[in-house]
Amino acid sequence: MKILRLLAAPLAALTLTVSAAALAHEAAPSEKVTVLQDQMLKNVPGKKALMIEVDYQPGQASIAHKHEGTAMAYVLSGEIISQVKGEQAVSYKAGEYWYEPAGSEHLVSKNASATQPAKLLVFMVLSPDEKVLIPLKN
């Protein structure tokens, strides 16, 4: 009984911490990323092709990041605002696309609509040990 009383306060604090973290995450959920294909390239030794789908809820945005690999993006539905460091932000509608060279700093990637979802198809070429996304520090 005494041990239970001693553990009660730390367990309650841990529960509150986990609950607060869960609520904070729910308040700002990240985009949904689905890997559609991940294949080694036989004609380009040491490189792989990665195809991913990125689903944005209304008003949702990615964190500022960079990709070690080359990326090509195609808007499947909705409208996406994208900005790479050194360039102006551009709004892309369904059917439009862009290219990002390896190492580009992707400052803005977000759903342009506050009411409609948006979906993006991304094709990347990178080494198996390279990261798909590296968060940028402020």
Image (cartoon, rainbow, N blue to C red):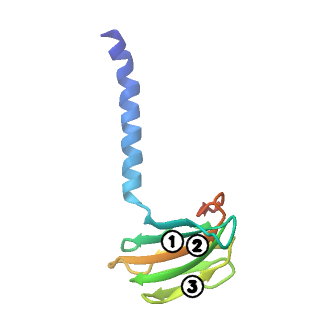
Which mark is first along the chain, 1 or 2?
A: 1
Q: Is residue 12 above or below residue 3?
A: below
Q: Secondary structure at mark 3?
A: strand
User: Where's residue 62, x and y in %?
Assistant: 50, 68
Mark before the other along the chain sequence, 3 or 1:
1
> Considering only vertical position in the picture, is 18 above or below 119?
above
User: In the rendered view of the protein, which quadrant contains the N terminus?
Assistant: top left
Amino acid on which the number 2 mark rests in the picture = Met
Please rate how many residues cluster around mark 2, counting C-alpha atoms within 10 Å: few if below 14, some from 14 to 19, many from 20: many
State left or right for residue 81 relative to residue 16. right
User: What residue is drawn where x is 45% and y is 83%?
Assistant: 75
Q: Quadrant of residue 10?
A: top left
**Nearer the observer, disc 3 or disc 2?**
2
What's the distance in space between the residues labelled 2 and 1, CA to CA? 6 Å
Residue 45 image offset from top left, x and y in percent:
69, 67
Q: Which residue is mark 3?
A: 98
Q: Which residue is mark 2?
A: 124
Please, which residue is most extreme toward the left here?
A: 1
Category of crowding for the residue at label 1, using alpha-carbon neighbours closer than 10 angstroms: few (below 14), some (14–19), many (at least 20): some
Where residue 49 sits, quadrant-wise, is: bottom right
For numbered disc 1, what is the local secondary structure?
strand
Write down the residue under mark 1.
51
Q: Position of residue 135 (x, y in %)?
A: 60, 61
**Alpha carbon separation for disc pair 3 and 1:** 15 Å
Q: Quadrant of the C terminus?
A: bottom right
SS class, disc 2: strand
Q: Is residue 103 left or right of residue 124?
A: right
